[in-house]
Image (cartoon, helix red, strand yellow):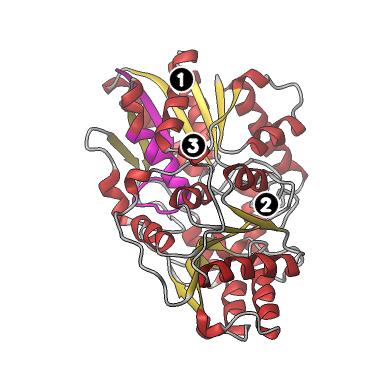
Amino acid sequence: MKKLLVISYYFPPSGGPGVQRVLKHIQYLPEFGWEPIVFTVQDGDYPARDESLLAKIPKSVKVHRVPFFEPYRLYRKLTGKPEGTAIDVNVIKKEGQKISFKEKIAEFIRASFFIPDARIAWFFSAKKELNALFKEHKIQGVYSSSPPYTCSLIGSYVQKQFKIPWVAGFRDPWTNFISSPKRWFLPAWIDKKMERSVFSKADAIECAWEGIIKDAFSKYPNLNLEKFHHIPNGFDSSDFPKTEFKENEKFTISYTGSMYGRRNPKSFFDAVELLLQKKKIDKERIKLKFIGRFGAEVEEMFQKVSFPSSIEKIGYSPHSESVKHLLNSDALLLIVDESKESEEIVPGKVYEYLGVGKPIIAIAPENSAISNLIKQAKAGEIAHQSEVKKIAEVFLNFYNAWESKKSVIFPNKELISSYERKNAAKKLANILDKIS
């Protein structure tokens, strides 16, 4: 079996959807001839922690954890935020949203000096550890998972230093993305130079959604298209708890994941308000569950609605508990960021939504990648953020079907089953075999 170095900042006990992609790759790659060795950080500053995922790491997989300086701890002190405050949900704001003077200073520092991201210090502390690792193991390939994009720089170093093939993995685009800092010209130039270098030097590039590939070619049209591969996210049905569904006393819609800035429930709440005003639904008969991490502006939205008793807010939950909430729901809510990238974004959690087989209310652009996926899977209905009346119609349709105990979707089970995580690992193994 060939040995593969897997470079990933986000790894258990880190939680969140990005972790699942790498965790499932390492779980299934051995079935296709590749033995993973994980190279990650020690005591990372994760937006969410899920200690239960540590038990999901196969016992045969060696994990090397490298200590390094985490600048986000300083960021909290500078901005006066308590230790442990999630950075991502409170940094990514809506366009024009006001931020404090301290936050402006911190953002300037982030944009000017942390290139490509705040984890760049790991690149320098990793080199010594990597040299020792390669003396111990005969490693024949390397796979990096970004963001953070520092993982790509480490992957590039390994490829050059140890002369082995490298697959650069991307879960999001790099520069000029919704979560990217707004850099002035010099750091922006350096960042783009790094990005282009990675795309040019990697032996293969695998992307979680096709929009990442389109983004790369919009910036650098002369790249080699044959090096780019779309490996979608997925779900692992073996992780789904064996629970018997019991009919809910209230029509229950669940949302799992983070919400902040341009990903918020305003349009959805406006649609519910409209239905309540028209007496089409009874607020005593609905339950809206939000499971995850939420920015301050979203927390405020929870309080301002006329139906707060219908909202159940649950903090970040272990992955197994999160899936259980989905399985015990009558419908699922998906909200795509309201941004220039909206048409291409495919949130990883949509595949888990597909896997559990519940009707999906997707608030996203009509002609978008996520819209096409849901239509092909016959898994739900889509409405744009600006279409409050249409969102209300979809909600009412699902609500009435629940009351009359009728099905509203008839999923394409063959298509959905193709998104099992094992299939993604097989595709990655095929790429590695091709470039080895």
Residue 251 visible somewhere in the drawing: yes
Mark before the other along the chain sequence, 1 or 2: 2
Image disc number at residue 41: none
Residue 92, percent from left and from top: 63, 60
Q: Amino acid at mark 2?
A: Ile
Q: Amino acid at mark 3?
A: Glu
- Disc 2 target residue: 178
> Residue 144 in magenta?
no
> Residue 12 in magenta?
yes
Q: Amino acid at mark 1?
A: Asn
- Alpha carbon of mark 1 to alpha carbon of mark 3: how far? 22 Å
Residue 19, percent from left and from top: 43, 46
SS category of the residue bearing label 1? helix
Residue segment shown in magenta: 1-27
Residue 99 visible somewhere in the drawing: no
- Alpha carbon of mark 2 to alpha carbon of mark 3: how far? 33 Å
User: Which mark's residue is nearer the viewer, 1 or 3?
Assistant: 3
- Disc 1 target residue: 430
Q: Is residue 45 left or right of residue 210?
A: left
How packed mark 3 is, by other alpha carbons closer than 10 Å (few <14, some 14-19, many 20 or more), is: few
- Image quarter (top left, top right, bottom left or bottom right) of the N terminus: top left
Look at the picture and state if 269 lies above or below 156.
Answer: below
SS category of the residue bearing label 3? helix
Q: Is residue 312 left or right of residue 409?
A: left
Look at the picture and state if 378 lies above or below 109.
Answer: above
Image disc number at residue 414: 3
